[in-house]
Amino acid sequence: MKKKIIILPGDGIGKEVTTEGKRVLEKIAEIFGHQFEYDTALIGHDAIETTGSPLPDESLAKLKSCDAILFGAVGHPKYDNDPTLKVRPEQGLLKMRKELGLYANLRPIKLFDELLEASSIKPEILKGSDILFFRELTGDAYFGEKGRKDDGNTAYDMMIYQRYEVERIAHKAFQAARTRRKKVTSVDKANVLESSRLWRETVQLVGKQYPDVQLEHQFVDTAAMKLIQSPRSFDVVLTGNLFGDILTDEASQIAGSMGMLASASIGDAVGLYEPIHGSAHDITGKGIANPLASILSAALLLDISFGLKEESNGILEAVSNALRSGFRTADIADARTPKEKILNTRSMGDCIVEQLSLTHATVNH
Ligand code: NAD
């Protein structure tokens, strides 16, 4: 298969982890006989420093003409500590999502058995948890009318959804459920909010087209409780922008560390794949960032954008094998991890590449 992939490192540890994600993609191409062509583009703080814009036109043009994007993260302490700065790295991220029509954020929460002890939740509750979130990205209180009145003493953010926005992501969630355990839990607050009543009504109608998939509805407060109480009861979770933002961060704790979680943002064209973590200024340049979230993002890219299931599963297996062999980066190590098994960013990348070589013979091409 011949495909063009843009590597969009961004800022901070984004550069360090995408380097390893790319190396794993290169190894997969070598093993399975694919031709992946790579290019890079600027976004975030680096882009502002070089061009004045957090997402220059040249970057956007490249992103629009590729087959998939492997993104790192944006952010710099300069902006975190000065909210008055008008041009900011995260504007590049929001503009990119909007321009590429990325309306669904997929976040798989899969716990590797080897990391059961890394979570603050009891292992017997967690074991076997495997949840796929679909968070809507273009509507809700984030994009509704907002403002202040009464001399600045009253503020409002309108929570707004249009039927087509709910329909398109609901279809994606039901289609994904068909390839999994065939259950969708739609999360809303339909007992109080009109936008949630439209959400529920629309999801019910879409659900009728997927009679083989079980549909249940939960209020967001109940869902927040059940995620910790019985995470195994969830398969696909479908929810709006604000509830999804909160619930997916809550659910990240099921997997133990931010450094392990990948996400995909998809629409009707090119897909964007990124770790859920940010640019982590506190560890930037030390070479100790966990690259597994970026490597797992590369696995999602192969599966979702290119339909390369075997290749994607190969990466998951390699990560699993590395963890089973006791290898850890510092963020997922514990008191029992021997010093020699604590790897830095580069050596964890090496370890995954080596695991891939061990389990797959290179195709002759
Ligand atoms: P963060 O995710 O960057 O870091 C939170 C904590 O987790 C830090 O202690 C960090 O060292 C640790 N961590 C994160 N990823 C890790 C990894 N791969 N390996 C090991 N440890 C890891 O969140 P933050 O500190 O709140 O934000 C830092 C910057 O990132 C800010 O400028 C913020 O705006 C930006 N940010 C960007 C994105 C994005 O680009 N999608 C997302 C979140 C935050």
Image (cartoon, helix red, strand yellow):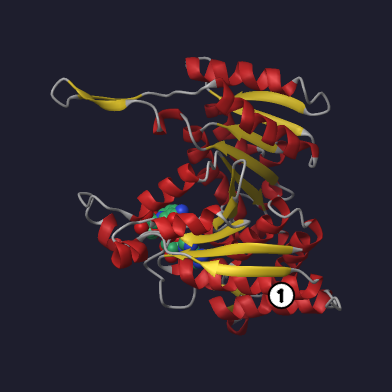
Residue at the (40%, 55%) spot, across then down:
57
The image shows residue 321 at horizontal and vertical percentages of: 75, 70
Where is mark 1, residue-wise? 27
Q: Quadrant of the N terminus?
A: bottom right
188 vs 250: above or below? above
The image shows residue 146 at horizontal and vertical percentages of: 31, 27
Q: Quadrant of ligand 1?
A: bottom left
Determine whether the residue tagged by mark 1 lies in a helix, strand or loop: helix
Residue at the (35%, 66%) spot, across then down:
46
Q: Is 52 positioned to the left or the right of 151 in the image?
A: right
The amino acid sitting under disc 1 is Lys
Q: Residue furthest bottom?
A: 340
Q: Quadrant of the C terminus?
A: bottom right
The image shows residue 319 at horizontal and vertical percentages of: 70, 67
Residue 289 shows in this picture: no
Q: Nearer the viewer, residue 27 or 254?
A: 27
Q: Is the CB of the residue bearing disc 1 within 8 angstroms of ligand 1? A: no
Give the crowd class for mark 1: few <14, some 14-19, many >=20 residues within 10 Å: some
